Image (cartoon, rainbow, N blue to C red):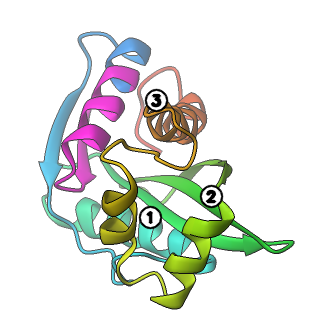
Amino acid sequence: MKFFVGTKNGKKIDVFTKIITARFPEKVDVVEYPAKSEVTDTPWDEDTFKGAKNRANNSLKSSPDCDYGVGIETGLLDRYGQLIEETWCCITGKEGKVYLGYASGNVIDNEISKRIIKNNGSKILEVLDSVSSSWNPWSGNPMIRQESLTCAIKIAVSQLPDSGKIS
């Protein structure tokens, strides 16, 4: 099975490759493809889901050899006055079946949230880099963002048919 993963982000590629090869040893080929998300660089609310879906669909269309297109998108949402980072994984099979995974819950510190909101999220990486160089400076734990990616990807991959048939 050939998976085209719609990102240039090495961490997303690495996490997806580790999970998919654990699920289907010796059966998969993972190809990095720079698919467009067709949403802003820092998507908010439903745009995070749309970005993952667009990346999956654009990856799938990129090659007749592609069995599954994969989109992984991380974005922000405002819930109950808290800014939260969420991750979506969308895997689309060449026959049109869609497999979704979702992870949320990284609550961003209020002081950092204010700075992100002030910039409409457009400079989120600059804000976060000014605080710390870790993946998730508001938690003090650089592993949390990777866990969010892992969770969303595992949920989507777990839905793929065991037989490896394309659906």
Is label 3 or label 1 in front? 3
Residue drawn at (44%, 35%) of the image: 146
Does 122 sit above or below residue 105? Answer: below
Indicate the quadrant where residue 1 lies.
top left
Secondary-structure class at tag 3: helix
Frontmost of labels 3 and 2 is: 2
At label 1, the amino acid type is Ala
Question: Which residue is labeled 1 in the image?
Answer: 52
Q: On the image, numbered disc 3 is attached to which residue? A: 143
> Which residue is found at the position 37% from the left and 25% from the top?
20
Q: Is residue 150 above or below residue 54?
A: above
Asked if the residue at tag 1 contacts the one at tag 3, i.e. Cβ–Cβ closer than 8 Å, the answer is no
Specify whether residue 44 is in view: no
> Between 15 and 106, which is closer to the camera in this rendering?
106
Say left or right for 21 vs 66.
Answer: right
Disc 3/disc 2 C-alpha distance (Å): 15 Å
Taking the image as shown, residue 108 lies to the left or right of residue 122, namely right
- Part of the protein shown in magenta: 1-19
- Name the residue nearer the viewer: 62 or 11: 11
State the residue position of label 2: 108
Task: Please report whichever mark, 2 or 1, sits nearer to the chain's N-terminal start.
Answer: 1
Q: Give the foreground label among 2 and 1.
A: 2
Looking at the image, which residue is at 14% across and 47% down? 32
Q: Secondary structure at mark 1?
A: helix
Looking at the rendered structure, the kind of residue marked 3 is Met
Q: Residue furthest right?
A: 80
